[in-house]
Image (cartoon, rainbow, N blue to C red):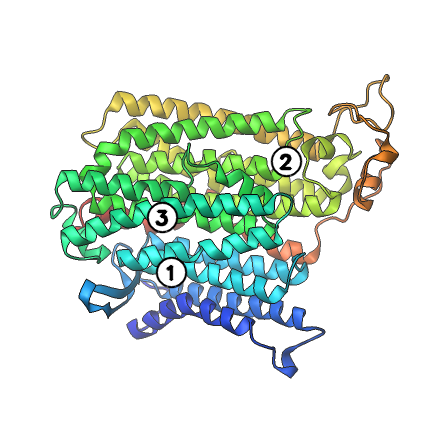
Amino acid sequence: MTVIDISPSVMQFLLAFIVVAPLLGAVAALLPAPPGLRGKSPDQAVLRHGVTVTGAVLIAAIVLAVGFDHGHPATMQATTDISWIPALDVRIHLGIDGISLPLLLLTALLTFLCALHSYFKPPAGPSPKAFTALVLVLESGTLATFAVLDLLLFFLAFEMVLIPMYFLIARWGGDQRRAAAWKFILYTLLGSVVMLLGLLLIGLRSGTFDMVALATDNGRGLTTSVQVIAVLAIGVGLAVKTPMWPLHSWLPDAHTAAPTVGSVLLAGVLLKMGTYGFVRILLPIAPDGMRTFAPYLAAFAVVGIVYGSLACLALARRGAKGDLKRLIAYSSVGHMGFVLLGIATMTPTGVNGALFANIAHGLITGLLFFLVGAVKDRYGTADLDTLAGATGAALYGRAPRLGALLAFAAVASLGLPGLAGFWGEMLTLFGAYSPAEGLSRPAFRTFMAIGAFGTLLTAAYMLIVVRRVCMGGHTPHPRLSPAAPADGPEPTAPAEARPATPRQATAIPQSATAPQLADVQRYEAVTWTPLAALTVLAGLWPAVLLGLTDPAVQKLLAGGKS
């Protein structure tokens, strides 16, 4: 069943265009703009070029989704299969099914929204030419990761995103950006080296790097020992990118230092590449190896859920001087723990929940990072104590639409029923209650209980954040000076000795008549509305996504048999 009947050749062209167009656009961004397209300045022209290219890719992705045969989502569609390196039997093999199509659409949407945001609020840093080119290369690599069906091409696309993200953090980031960028690149490169060894082991032992053929074989051409080694090697590389506790320590630093656009893309799409690799490669190609490591993967996942939540609670408490961007980064460790738990169950219910949670996390956390970036722009800081203790009437009173959106994103992140965050967590917990045959039910039910406890912790820290940022601090204690925030520690220096931006200076008085902040701007509303609307749509009508993923997951777990 297709919405519009599109010929296979056009579908092939659309998928190839989606993968290649951002790369060509990145090259064009570095060239001088034609005289008629320069606008007011070359900087404006190149940022507009970024919006145009990412917009064209988004339109092509939507047309591809419209032409997709929704009646057979388990079948690879829009396929291209061309020999590239005959000596190694490496092929340019592209295709999409119900698992990869939602991730393709999510990537195209978030990159377009980031380009649009950058056009109206240009990044502070070096030349916008380089910034636009790096964002487009990042988009091309991410889209290719979800579209390729060859193990070596998957690795190349997987690595293609590292350099652009490194420079986005190192050149356009905030404090400690260079250290955070180096930590990001070293962690991910180390994981990738180990992953490459595992991919080569599978390809050389099975005689092919074709992911469809390997999934159909379902590990029958690989011995159990080879599968175990391959899962260990590939799993480490994927776990770093996910990130899985305890390989997560690069993530909070990277998010805290990255510009707003970098944080949105890092959380919204880059983290999904790791979990996608678990589903697309390890589950169908090395099922015996996955069964061996599934209990350990689930254990690390639930530790990550609880650890991430406790870290967020520590950052949210009064006097901790917690950074709001850092808190959301740690929340991602917990949310991705649910994704890994669902994958570890090796059941259709758990894997569908993991894929749903992937998309929900991309929508909700992308929106959260956009909102936190806006709050930081207005106040000059993302420090929770400053935001909670020195903002007078706080966001509800000073920027009510911004405050309402932040509260909406927070309750969506904690898994409120009716919003996207709920279904993924619920399905993963259901999957853990009844894991695949051969896995310990008592162990997984214990993991389910720990994961359920993690949802309570998530609700706790998200509600604390909403109370402190949206409602502001408490009434100052009589013994404190009027300028001293009751929600944080007493200042150690006079107010005139502390540097403050103009926004911070106007935010300090504790009075009900504090001046208004700029509320949601028109370009911000255009950027954020699609994410909020899709969060509601996925929460109220989960069948839109599950109808795509479930048949494909069933086929994947059955060894390529529908």
Task: Please say whether residue 381 is visible from this viewpoint.
Answer: yes
SS category of the residue bearing label 3: helix
Q: Which of the image's four quarters has the N terminus?
A: bottom left
Camera-nearest label, 2 or 3: 3
Q: x and y percent of residue 457 in the render?
A: 51, 25
Of the two numbered discs 1 and 2 on the same chain, state the one appearing first in sequence.
1
Q: Is residue 395 above or below residue 46?
A: above
Marks 1 and 2: CB-CB under 8 Å?
no
SS category of the residue bearing label 1: helix
Question: Circle 3 is placed at which residue position?
Answer: 192
Front-lying residue, 146 or 405: 146
Name the side, left or right, on which 94 lies relative to 218: right
The amino acid marked with disc number 3 is Ser
Residue under the image location 35 percent in, 54 percent down: 100
User: On residue 167, which mark appears?
Assistant: none
Front-lying residue, 432 or 389: 389
For the residues marked 1 and 2, what is the alpha-carbon distance in whole angstroms?
34 Å
For the residues marked 1 and 3, what is the alpha-carbon distance in whole angstroms?
17 Å
The amino acid marked with disc number 2 is Asp
User: On residue 144, which mark appears?
Assistant: 1
Task: Please say whether residue 536 is visible from this viewpoint.
Answer: no
User: On residue 323, which mark appears?
Assistant: 2
For the residues marked 2 and 3, what is the alpha-carbon distance in whole angstroms?
30 Å
SS category of the residue bearing label 2: loop
Of the two numbered discs 2 and 3 on the same chain, state the one appearing first in sequence.
3
